Each structure stands twice: as C-alpha cells, then as structure tokens.
Image: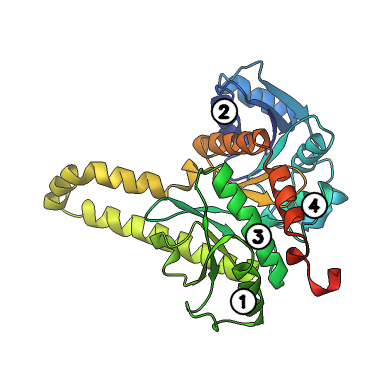
Amino acid sequence: MKIAIDAFGGDNAPDEVIKGAAAAVKKEAVEVVLVGDEKKIRERMAALEVASDKITVEDADGVILIEDDPMEIRKSKKDCSMGRAFAIVNEGKADAFVSAGSTAAIVVGGTVLTGRLKGVKRPALAPIMPSSTNHYLLLDGGANLECRPEMLLQFAVMGSIYMEKLMHVKTPRVGLLNVGAEEEKGRDLEHGAYELLKNSGLNFIGNVEGRDVPLGAVDVVVTDGFTGNVYLKAVEGMGKFMKTALKETIFGSGIAKVGALFSMKGIKKISKQMDYREVGGSPLLGSAKPVFKAHGSSDALAFRQAIWQAESFARHDVNKLISDALAEMGDKTKGESDK
C-alpha cells in the first residue's frame, strides 16, 4: 500500500514527517510518497540520513496554512502540499492520504476533492480516544457542526465498522452522547437519533453522559460536530492538566520521588495509554478515499502510527464495508427529504 503524506502539514514538518515515514516503511507492506517542496524535502532527508527505495518525493508548490480559507485547497492552493497529496490519491497513484495540517482544509479535501462514499450524507472526523478499558471512537469530532438524526445513525454505522475491523472490538457498543441516560433527555436531534439507533440492529446501549465515556462505557460515541469538538477539547485539556499535576506530585519532593520508583511501571502504562501518538491519526469516515488527520503537533512516532493506520484501513477496504452496510440499512439512513 502506498500512502501520500503532506510533508509540510503540522508543527514539526518536514523533519518529523520524514522520520515518521522512514520508520513506517520498515513495515513490509508500506510505501510512502512525501509531497511538498522537493528540494527542501531532499535536503532534510540527506541531513537526517534518511534513504529508502520505498520513499518517493512529489513536488508541490506552497502550503495551506491554518488561517487560510480551507476552500482555497480547491482554487489558489490546489497545488500546495496538501492539495497535491489529495490529487495523488484521487489519481490512483496512492491508496490513502495523511496530513497533520489544517483540519478544516482536510475536511474540505476529503469531502469535496475526493467526494463522499455513496449514500454518505456527511463524512465525520473520528478521533480515537483513550478510556480506562482501552479506546473508543468519537463521531463527529468537528467536521459537521449541525447534524440531523440520520447523520448520527450513519456515524454509528461507520464507527462500528471501524472499531470492529481495525481496532478488533467485537460487536462495538454504541452510545449517544447526551445530558442524561434517560431516553427522553436531549434535544430534537437526540430524540430522533435515539429512535433510529434503537431500531438499527447495532449494539446500541442508549444515551451516555460525557463523564462515563472515558470510563469505558462505550466503544463508539456519536454526537454532532459542535458538541463532539467541545467534548474532545475538554478531554484533551483535562488530560494535559492531569499529566502536569501528576508530574508535580511525583517529582515534587524527595520522598515522592522514591515512591514513584516503585510505581514507575504503572505510571508508564497509563502514560502510554493516554498518549495520542500511539494512535497516530483520526480517520475522516465517509470520504470516498482513506483520509487521515494526524495531530498538529505530531512527532515521528505519531506519523508512523498514522501511516500504519491508513495502510490498514486501505488494506481492509473499510470503505467498501461501510458502503455495503449503509446500502443494507437502506431507508433507515435516509432523511425525510431523501425519500
């Protein structure tokens, strides 16, 4: 599988992208196309002593920035590193796309440039989050600020397939993010989505409160992109706070440091479980091509993991599984305007 990666997306590009690619191609099935200013990429590859016949370079003009209008990826910046990476995938020269660049531009590219899977109303950004038991998938993480009930049903279908096929979770539990567990809780969106999910044939466990999600209550949690992004940022912030507080507590005194030595194995286990780099990237589920958004501050480990994720997604043909599942559900995933 060949993965096209935006070599200039993210805070640590291009060096960490290059190092991540070098680590990723050690896996037999993976090849990488680094897309961006060819001269700069080759200069940095030489400086980093990276050389592999499984890494190729595709020249591109410029970079789309966070402050840019994301729609410019279709117009004035269509030949930038991200735009060319999308083009390579669309042209069939690569099997999947990875970037740590502008989330908004990636959503536009993965929706407009690649198109959507047949039957999908809106692709959803699906970050993989750590829980006390393992991981769970959040849909939507911010691609669609306003949603309809049938969109949340599609999110649940796509998320369940991803967790089962790539994360090896048998019969994933699906929860609807809400302000209470009772069926009557929430807005019209949650009321409508609840009825659809209840009759979907998925392993729907009902409404779930935000406090219970990180404790392992579900494997897939669905909500609109506005609520999902607020939840995502709150969890990220709390994780950073806890990590800082833990360090200050453990290393705050000599006695604490001695005690920490006896707990180091457990501390390392928790730290690894909460480390976003171990997951690598968030899929844009519903895009017609495998599209992955890596964290903006990704390092070589995170890029390696994101590339491996994208390769696994393409190899398992997850998009076909999603399309088949949506087609089988038929009218359940259609809104009134579609019938």
Contact between labelled residues 1 and 4, with CB atoms less than 8 Å apart: no
Give the x, y percent position of residue 175.
53, 65
**Given this view, does label 3 or label 2 mark the residue nearer the observer?**
3
User: What mark, if any, has residue 142 been given in the picture?
Assistant: none
User: Marks 4 and 1: which is nearer the front?
Assistant: 1
Question: Which residue is label 1 attached to?
Answer: 190
Mark 4 or mark 3, which has the lower sequence index?
4
Label whose residue precedes the other's in the sequence (3 or 2): 2
- The residue at which mark 3 appears reads as 155
Residue 101 position within the rendered picture, expressed as x and y whole percent measured from the top left: 66, 47
Identify the amino acid type marked 2.
Ala
Residue 180 horizontal/vertical position (percent): 48, 79
- Tell me the residue that label 2 is attached to: 24
Mark 4 surroundings: few (<14), some (14-19) or many (≥20) residues within 10 A: some
Q: CA distance from mark 1 to mark 3?
A: 13 Å
Q: Position of residue 62 (x, y in %)?
A: 77, 41
Q: Secondary structure at mark 1?
A: helix
Q: Is residue 296 visible?
A: no
Check disc 3 and report its element: helix, strand or loop: helix
Q: Nearer the viewer, residue 296 or 210?
A: 210
Front of the two marks 2 and 4: 4
Quadrant assignment for the N terminus: top right
Which residue is under mark 4?
116
- Residue 95 image-quadrant placement: top right
How many neighbours does mark 2 have within 10 angstroms: few (below 14), some (14-19), or many (20 or more)?
Answer: many
Label 4 element class: loop
